[in-house]
Structure formats: structure tokens, C-alpha cells
Amino acid sequence: MRIIAHVDMDAFFAAVEQRDNPELKGKPVIVGGQGPRGVVSTCSYEARKFKVRSAMPMAQAKKLCPHGIFLPGNMKRYQEVSREVFEVLNRFTPIVEVASVDEAFLDLTGATHFYNSLEELGEALQAEIKKETSLTASVGIAPNKFLAKLASDWRKPQGLTIIRPEEVAEFLKTLPLEKLWGVGPVTCRTLKQYGFNTAGDLASVPLERLEAILGKKTGKVLWELAQGHDPRPVEVEREAKSMGQEQTFQVDLSAAEVKAPLAQLAGKVGRRLRKEGLAASTITLKARYSDFKTVTRSRSFSTPIYDDDTIFQVAWEMLKELPTAKKYRLVGVTASNLVSKRQLSLFAEPCQDDLLATLDKLKAKYGNQVVVRGREIGG
Ligand SMILES: [Mg+2]
């Protein structure tokens, strides 16, 4: 069973403004576009008392709360503070998904044994965020992302809501359809026409009934959500969208002569992937011919890869498909469409992983030349 948390900062932009400018504390602060078509992006809880809400036209907010403090916002500043928050979250688990500038999903399955209870874990999250940023967050903890997000929204600000597996059905029974992921106004209207009003209503009919009304795909997704099932993993996003290595040669090389340097480049890319705990769904080969013409070839896989052998094989195959008469002044190997290795269940045999880990350690300690594979020498 997974333990997933959704962390949602309370009135984030407005809270940052109040923190940085103490004279704004306790006042209705409204952050958003100040132009004629501006909308509210965040407002403090003091402003919410005047019924100001996110996404409301700014003109309407000004009518509802004429004494409010209206600010254009400072995204750069909010992003700085967001980074501080995410640093705190990463202390609890490396599996953190950035849902937005002020929202995150955490897979805490491996962290629970450090705490006596989920309450303690949730309170620790909130306390640590408060200590480091002076800001408050609402936290939901549940067996999956869908329920965790519902939970964090349950009580705000500074709410901590835990949904245990045995409480899921009760929680969903009366949940309005609009709260289900992916239910927009159109789907909602359709479902209401058929007499469905809550998640519990959807859960109580056979799957085939929803598939008949909404189509196979949507029907299945909503029926599963209504049962409280959501298999989506917490996806670690990396700033690096790709990792590449390339090499320019002193003299132009034939395809056969390129094989060894290509193997070395593949090894470097593989090591970087493993160091970051990532795997690549796409490998791209870059080749520059002696006449400076540059070509790239890419190949993608349904099971992402991270081992030197496969990266090299793929790159080498793509190179062999290029015109044979050419000479090369540069080749490069890039891994992209990166995913966290932890998300992948279908992975290479453990012994291969052990071997790679040992080689990586040796190379980190003694340099790249300590262990060299046959293909990296050439000849
Ligand atoms: Mg928020």
C-alpha cells in the first residue's frame, strides 16, 4: 500500500507578500493582473472573507473588497520561495512531484517507519515548512494522488487530513462529481442527466454502465476514481530534460573508428543517468560529417533504459544506418524523455544493476580508465 501526500501552500503568493512585508499582515491582500482584463491569482484569507476568490476578474474583486491591497505579484520571488519549500519536501522523500509552484505530491511509502503515525508525519511536514519558510501549508495523506489532493483541500488553511484505506468508501460516498479528476462541466451535466450526483453514485453501478454513457476510456477512469483507485505514480520531474555527451575528433574518423569513442560516450551518458536515478525513453545520435553537415537520429523505447550496453547498441545501430562512405568529425549521444528509475517496474536483472553500480563506483574513485570495456578501446 502506498502512502501519498499532497502538500498545498496556503494562499501562497499572498502569504509570501505578507511575510516579506509585515505591514501587510492581517490585511486583505489580493495578488493578480492589474490591467483591465486582470484576474485574481491568489488572495489572503482576510480577502476571502469579502468573497474574493482566485480566477475572479480583478474589477469584481475591487468591488467586493475596495479596501484591499492589490498587488501585481512577483513571480520571480514566488519561485525562489517555492524552491525553499521543495528543498524541505525533499528531506522527507526523494520522490516529489512538482504539481505547481505551490503544490506537490510526495510518495512517503518509504518514510513512514520514521514516524509513529501518519498524523505525526503530516505534522512534521507542516512544522518543517513553517520553520524554514514561515509559511503554512495544508496537507492531505492518502493511499493515492487523487485522494491525497482531495484530502489537502478538505480543511484549509493549515489543515491536515488523512484518509485511511478503510475510510475511502465513506469519503467518496457523498463527494460531488465535480471533485472527480477530469470531470468538467460537460461530463458533469451528462452524468447528472443519468441521475448521478456523487462519486458514490458512480461507484455503485457496474463499469459497463459508465462505459456506455461516457465511452470506454473516460468511463473506466471515472469508475476507478469513484472506487478510490488511482494507480498514477508520483512522478519526479527533473530540471534536466536531457543528458548528452559529444566528442570532436582531432582527425576525421571512419564509421569503424568511431565505434570506440561512441562506446565511451554511451558509457558516460549511462553513468550520468544512473547517478541521477533516471532512465531514458529516447536516445539520440548526433553525427557531424567531414563537410560539417550535421545529422541526428533518434530512437524511443516503451521501457526506458539506463545501461551502457543498450545505449551503445542503439547509438551504434543508428550510426551504421548512415551513409557508409562518410567520415566523421564529431559524434554525440543524448538521452532524453527522462523518467525516474523508481517509477519503472520492468527493469533489468538485479545482477546487471549490481555490476553497473560496481563499475560506476570504481570509475568515480579511480577515473574513467580504471575499467575499460573491450568495445571502448577500438581496433
Ligand atoms: Mg495553494
Image (spheres, helix red, strand yellow):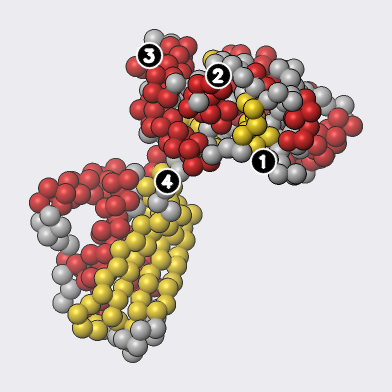
Q: Which residue is mark 3?
A: 115
Element type where label 4 sits in the image? loop
**Which numbered circle lies on residue 33?**
1
Element type where label 2 sits in the image? loop
Residue lying at 75% horizontally and 44% vertically, measured from the top left: 36
Quarter of the picture holding the C terminus:
bottom left
Callout 3 amino acid: Tyr
Give the quadrant of residue 127.
top left
- Percent coordinates x, y for residue 262 in the rendering: 27, 69
User: Is the residue marked 2 within 8 Å of ligand 1, measured from its CB?
Assistant: no
Mark toward the viewer: 2 or 3: 2
Query: Which label's residue is closer to the chain start, 1 or 4?
Result: 1
Distance, label 1 to label 4, CA atoms, is: 30 Å
Categorize mark 4 by other alpha carbons within 10 Å: few (<14), some (14-19), many (20+). Answer: some
Q: Which residue is mark 2?
A: 25
Mark toward the viewer: 3 or 4: 4
**Is residue 274 visible to the viewer in this orientation of the structure?**
yes
Task: Determine the residue located farthest toward the top in the rendered image.
Answer: 116
- Quick check: 91 left or right of 99? left
Contact (Cβ within 8 Å) of mark 1 with mark 2: no
Task: Determine the residue located farthest toward the right in the rendered image.
Answer: 193
Query: Which label's residue is closer to the chain start, 1 or 3?
Result: 1
Callout 2 amino acid: Lys
- Percent coordinates x, y for residue 131 in the rendering: 39, 19
Contact (Cβ within 8 Å) of mark 3 with mark 4: no
Residue lying at 41% horizontally and 32% vertically, measured from the top left: 84
- Percent coordinates x, y for residue 143 in the rendering: 53, 23
When the figure is inspected, residue 166 is found, relative to residue 150, above or below; the finding is above
Give the quadrant of residue 284.
bottom left
Distance, label 1 to label 2, CA atoms, is: 21 Å
